[in-house]
Image (spheres, rainbow, N blue to C red):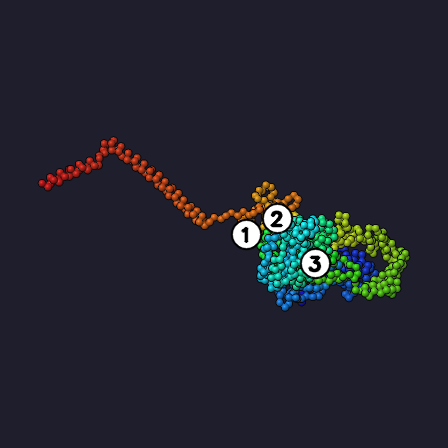
């Protein structure tokens, strides 16, 4: 059962509510402006307008009163069955459920997009929407064709890949159980000035070349091995190959890519498989118009030209293909192109990826040693994203996309999701609006498909520009006095007749009729811009546009202009007032309501520094400027995450944005590398961040006078070597010892000073005591007194004894 997403219904409901508010609050009803005299004309005025085909409706009113808002017609007595009010509708024709695995018995019926077929019935100006879901299934078959440059400079690479098949099959076997491998090679056009054409070089272009004297004749493209699951065949064929030699540096690789893409049966591409084309080279390719140097003026026709020997037979007959042709054929055949190039060519081929959808670029070592890791990384990169493309897009239909990726957040204006895991489902809301009606009976079809997928959504479009009541029109109806056709409630009179029922002839006039041709008493007859005939105004023709209305009071040229353009070219002039097309507002319709241009590359409205007014950002953050307020040297986040992530992905091909297309889309600032960073410009902001390896990366951010942001970064991050554990231990122990010694020395010094002071005080007291003994008559020596007393005691003791 098909269910439109909630966000899609919200968009449609919001549009209806806005229309209701506009037409209930505006002073002039656009539907009754007087320009519509038939049902078909009424429906083209605006998608909110309806027509009443009821016969007795609107008597004593002008013809245009039948064209009004639907609710107004019902209020005025028009029965619903007579109201012509078509709306845009969607019918689901095929809606098979999404598959989960790409292998097994159901591998030929794998479904990765839902729905598969829908039909749109569009009323011009009436926007509608539908949703689609995409899922990359697990274990999907893979066809890989290895296209190798066999010019002389690739000799060491050829030696490296001689056993590539076995190793690559082992690694790819971890990702898919159904893997096939093929091989082809190229050099360049065998004609001057691209190759050596002298007779002595015809059989051996290396003739006389000392470093490598023998090689095979020059060729454009040679298909060697069709896609096969027998990897030993790949090894055998590669081991047979020899290099060749061309004259100029660029190679004829784009000739080879196109042949590998369009020669489906010869290469063996399967419909039910991912198609990977690995393009390995060490130089730049020749592009379209380069062939004129050799006299080739016929553009490439985009067809397969392999002869019986599986060689490109038109190499010397047609020019090299253009990037546009290459991208068209790769998309047509659902081929992912992987550029495997050396480091010095990375930037050149990365620029090609922006011009050719579904391509990636990886850095190849000089001898191709990393080719297996390169292919695995590119395959995982391809499988981690989903991007929608539209083919055969009708010019009169507007399409707008909103992506809802794995985080569940809607991204208006985006048709791509990245960083996906295999098996995850993402959804896209698609808004559709027809701008006009094509010639009667015209039906359109277009296709929406993910890049590189065989699955697609086929969309059939038919237009609701005719009224159903026109199918029962009556020619020479009695209701029109048999001189007119009765159609959708009104009479279309034969030439020379007028009136609601063709009851009058042109030229009849009377005072009674004249009074009916004045808008009010005292006003001019037919506003001075027409003649009164048979109770009706016949408006004059004007070189400026159309004059209309019951009293010729309106025209389609007296409205506000913008830069000299009526209603800015985005609206219709109705009776002096611009009625804007969907997506525009304002007195002169110069203000767009579209907000997709206001979203910055990181998905934020005006980078979070302003508001979207008339489709453009008005920056409110001081110092912010740029189309999406993305430039702001004085803002606190001037050195924001985005800028240093861009440094990482652009200079070192690392970090969260390392995906080539993501980096290319988000990182548009000019980056200059220097050996040392000297911030000489005072307007430049110095930024510092820490890398994954704990190194410090410095760069400056400057807004140039030209309006372009310039980042000046160091060529390499600053990585200081950390101290060893032993050094730290010795430093700690040494510091402790040193502090201890200092404390002991300080303590010793303090004690010494204290002792010396006490000793000096003792010496001073001693000197003072000696002075007292010598100069005081009352002082007796304590020793002398002691001995005298002892003698007296002995005498008295002895006498007592005897």
Q: Which residue is mark 3?
A: 306
Q: What number is the disc on residue 692?
A: 1
**Residue at 67% in and 53% down:** 203
The percent position of residue 89, horizontal first and vertical second, equals 72, 63
Closer to us: 307 or 79: 307
Estimate how packed mark 3 is, as few (under 14), some (14 to 19) or many (20 or more) residues with alpha carbons within 10 Å.
Answer: some
3D distance between C-alphas at marks 2 and 1: 48 Å
Q: Which mark is residue 210?
A: 2
Q: Nearer the viewer, mark 1 or mark 3?
A: 3
- Please state the horizontal and vertical placement of residue 73, each as a whole percent of the image: 77, 62
In this rendered view, identify the residue nearer to me: 539 or 443: 443
Q: Nearer the viewer, residue 201 or 622?
A: 201
- The answer to which image quadrant residue 79 occupies is bottom right
Tell me which numbered mark, 1 or 3, is placed earlier along the sequence. 3
Residue located at (73% from left, 62% from top): 460
Q: Tag 3's secondary structure?
A: loop
């Amino acid at each position: 059962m098909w269910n439109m997403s909630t966000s899609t219904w919200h968009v449609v409901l919001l549009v209806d509510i806005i229309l209701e508010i506009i037409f209930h609050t505006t002073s002039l009803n656009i539907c009754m402006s007087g320009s519509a005299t038939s049902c078909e004309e009424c429906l083209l005025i605006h998608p909110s307008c309806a027509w009443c085909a009821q016969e007795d409706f609107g008597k004593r009113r002008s013809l245009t009163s039948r064209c009004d808002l639907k609710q107004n017609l019902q209020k005025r007595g028009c029965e619903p069955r007579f109201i012509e009010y078509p709306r845009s509708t969607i019918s689901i024709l095929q809606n098979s459920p999404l598959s989960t695995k790409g292998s097994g018995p159901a591998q030929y019926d794998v479904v990765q997009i839902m729905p598969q077929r829908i039909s749109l019935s569009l009323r011009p100006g009436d926007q509608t929407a539908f949703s689609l879901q995409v899922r990359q299934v697990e274990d999907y078959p893979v066809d890989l064709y290895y296209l190798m440059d066999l010019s002389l400079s690739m000799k060491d690479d050829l030696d490296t890949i001689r056993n590539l098949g076995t190793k690559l099959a082992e690694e790819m076997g971890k990702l898919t159980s159904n893997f096939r491998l093929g091989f082809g090679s190229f050099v360049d056009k065998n004609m001057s000035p691209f190759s050596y054409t002298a007779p002595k070089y015809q059989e051996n272009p290396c003739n006389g070349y000392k470093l490598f004297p023998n090689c095979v004749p020059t060729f454009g493209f040679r298909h060697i091995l069709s896609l096969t699951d027998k990897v030993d065949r790949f090894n055998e064929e590669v081991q047979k190959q020899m290099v060749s030699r061309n004259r100029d540096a660029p190679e004829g690789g784009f000739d080879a890519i196109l042949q590998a893409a369009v020669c489906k049966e010869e290469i063996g591409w399967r419909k039910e498989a991912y198609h990977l084309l690995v393009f390995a080279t060490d130089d730049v390719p020749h592009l379209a118009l380069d062939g004129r140097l050799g006299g080739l003026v016929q553009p490439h026709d985009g067809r397969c030209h392999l002869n019986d020997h599986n060689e490109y037979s038109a190499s010397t007959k047609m020019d090299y293909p253009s990037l546009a042709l290459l991208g068209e054929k790769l998309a047509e055949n659902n081929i992912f192109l992987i550029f495997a190039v050396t480091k010095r060519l990375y930037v050149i081929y990365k620029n090609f990826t922006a011009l050719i959808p579904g391509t990636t670029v990886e850095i190849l070592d000089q001898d191709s040693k990393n080719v297996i890791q390169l292919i695995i990384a590119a395959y995982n990169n391809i499988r981690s994203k989903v991007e929608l493309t539209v083919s055969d897009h009708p010019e009169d239909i507007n399409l707008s996309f909103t992506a809802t990726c794995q985080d569940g957040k809607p991204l208006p204006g985006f048709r791509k999701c990245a960083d996906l895991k295999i098996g995850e489902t993402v959804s896209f809301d698609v808004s559709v609006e027809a701008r006009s009606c094509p010639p009667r009976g015209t039906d359109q079809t277009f296709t929406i498909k993910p890049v590189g997928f065989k699955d697609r959504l086929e969309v059939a479009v038919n237009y609701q520009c005719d009224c159903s009541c026109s199918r029962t029109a009556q020619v020479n109806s009695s209701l029109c006095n048999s001189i007119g056709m009765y159609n959708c409630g009104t009479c279309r009179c034969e030439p020379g007749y007028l009136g609601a029922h063709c009851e009058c002839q042109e030229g009849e006039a009377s005072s009674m009729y004249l009074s009916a041709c004045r808008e009010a008493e005292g006003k001019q007859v037919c506003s001075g811009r027409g003649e009164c005939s048979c109770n009706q105004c016949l408006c004059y023709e004007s070189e400026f546009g159309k004059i209309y209305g019951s009293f010729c009071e309106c025209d389609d040229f007296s409205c506000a202009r913008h830069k000299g353009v009526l209603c800015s070219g985005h609206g219709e002039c109705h009776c002096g007032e611009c009625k804007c097309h969907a997506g525009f507002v304002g007195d002169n319709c110069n203000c767009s309501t579209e907000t997709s241009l206001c979203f910055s590359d990181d998905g934020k409205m005006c980078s979070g520094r302003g508001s979207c007014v008339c489709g453009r950002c008005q920056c409110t953050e001081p110092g912010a400027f740029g189309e999406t307020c993305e430039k702001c040297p004085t803002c606190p986040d001037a050195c924001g995450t985005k800028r240093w992530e861009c440094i990482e992905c652009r200079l070192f091909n690392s970090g969260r944005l390392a995906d080539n297309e993501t980096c290319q889309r988000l990182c548009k600032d000019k980056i200059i590398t220097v050996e040392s960073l000297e911030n000489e410009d005072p307007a430049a902001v110095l930024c510092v961040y820490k890398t994954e390896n704990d190194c410090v990366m410095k760069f400056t951010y400057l807004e140039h006078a030209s309006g372009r942001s310039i980042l000046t970064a160091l060529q390499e991050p600053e990585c200081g070597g950390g101290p060893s554990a032993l050094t730290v231990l010795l430093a700690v122990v040494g510091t402790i010892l040193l502090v201890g010694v200092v404390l002991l020395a300080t303590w010793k010094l303090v004690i010494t000073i204290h002792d010396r002071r006490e000793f000096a005080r003792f010496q001073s007291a001693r000197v003072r005591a000696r002075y007292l003994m010598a100069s005081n008559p009352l002082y007796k020596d304590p020793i002398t007194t002691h001995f005298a007393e002892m003698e007296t005691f002995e005498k008295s003791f002895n006498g007592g004894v005897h």
